[in-house]
Image: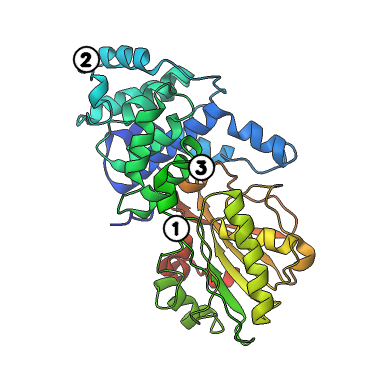
Amino acid sequence: MPFQIVREPIAGPLSFARSDDAAILTQAAVLLAIGAQLRGDNKRFRVASGGPAASATIPDEELKLLGLPPLGESLGRIDSAHNRQLLFSRYKLPIPSPAVLTETVIEDLNVFTGVAKTHFTEGSSKSAIDLMEICLRHRNELVRVSAAAAYSEHSSELDRLIRILDAGTHSTENLVRSIAATALTFAAPDNARLKEMQGIARQSGATGAGHTTMLIHGTWAQNSPWWQPGGDFHTYILQSVRPDLYSKQDRFGWSGGYSDAARALAASDLVTWVQNHKEQGLDLITHSHGGNIVFLATQNGLDMGELILLSCPVHVPKYQPDMAHIHKKVVSIRVHFDLVILADRGGQRFNFPGITENVLPIWFDHFATHNPDVWRQHNVPAMI
């Protein structure tokens, strides 16, 4: 079942003593955040985006709400085997052999709580590494996958992390699959599982104008029902928000691939689709990297009306709109501390002229922004 909506995170290490949805999601956020801190993501992102005024991958105010201590950038990979031996000895745990490194689950939540308390107190790279290492053995797959995603650039044992991420891509839970697949593209970009997850969803043809709003999905979502006719979000938008929503079989879709090349191809295809359908000036509602595809399309000459960005990762200046080709407003709607965007290493907020940000009082859930109940409860239609 999908995770429940979280309205407020659990500050400090207390989440590691619990196993409810809010606790599990907070643990995942802590792990992904410390991985980003050790990589120095905020520093690199601000340099690439144009200085301290640019959006950060981890907003400082949200780090404070989680209670996470500051953490400096870590250089290089650590000796994971040696570190694990010290860690397991400290907590009197049986030291696993290399053959069962990823299969040994620790059931005692006190172990995770103890390691978490040490990190929240010390705030050192050593305590961060220990927390990622121990959480590879958590009973919950989201916590394991988040630990592997965070640890993948710091551990000397990359193969075991790839196994955890690969397994996560087969999860029945959308959030787990998305974090695992996103992290896997950084850890093992040629992994065969990533190719399996892609597929061509686009349709061709030219049927003439008459529909002026369209949904564009994000990464890995080419076969997801929510954005297609009959899906819950498509039905909600059509019936309650935009009765002009494009619903024909030749609607635009793209491969869902996680790469610059896949997004560039999708942007080119989108321009062609709009030209063939004589739909210049249409409004677009996009999710995740679907928004960045539209940004690229505007740079290729796409003329459009309104652009609604749902949970869009910020990668300025690589992906940014040509505002001269957007003739209405650009509205961004997102949640606090989006876990998938953390795994994506993107920014959590736009600081770009002409883009209006709206942050819902929801934490962690990348997919909440295309949940019809969320739109109703928070009157999202009034924001657009």
Compare marks 1 and 2 and give the one earlier in the sequence: 2
Q: Residues within 10 Å of mark 3 (few under 14, many from 20)?
A: many
Residue 336: where, in percent of width, then height? 51, 49
Q: Badge 1 is on which residue?
A: 367
Residue 234: where, in percent of width, then height? 46, 75
Pick the front one: 348 or 102: 102
Residue 166 higher or lower than 299, as above or below: above
Q: Amino acid at mark 2?
A: Lys
Q: Residue at x 40, y 32 (%)?
A: 12
Q: Amino acid at mark 1?
A: Phe
Q: Residue at x 57, y 60 (%)?
A: 290
Residue 6: where, in percent of width, then height? 39, 52
Q: Is residue 280 visible?
A: yes
Q: Residue at x 44, y 59 (%)?
A: 368
For the residues bearing labels 2 and 3, Cβ distance under 8 angstroms: no
Q: Residues within 10 Å of mark 1 (few under 14, many from 20)?
A: some
The quarter in which the C terminus is drawn is bottom right
Q: How many numbered circles are shown?
A: 3
Residue 320: where, in percent of width, then height? 70, 54
Alpha carbons under labels 1 and 2: distance apart:
40 Å
Q: Secondary structure at mark 1?
A: loop
State the mark number for residue 92.
2
Compare marks 2 and 3 and give the one earlier in the sequence: 2
State the mark number for residue 50.
none
Report the residue that reaches farthest toward the right. 324
Alpha carbons under labels 2 and 3: distance apart:
33 Å
Q: Quadrant of residue 216?
A: bottom right
State the mark number for residue 342.
3
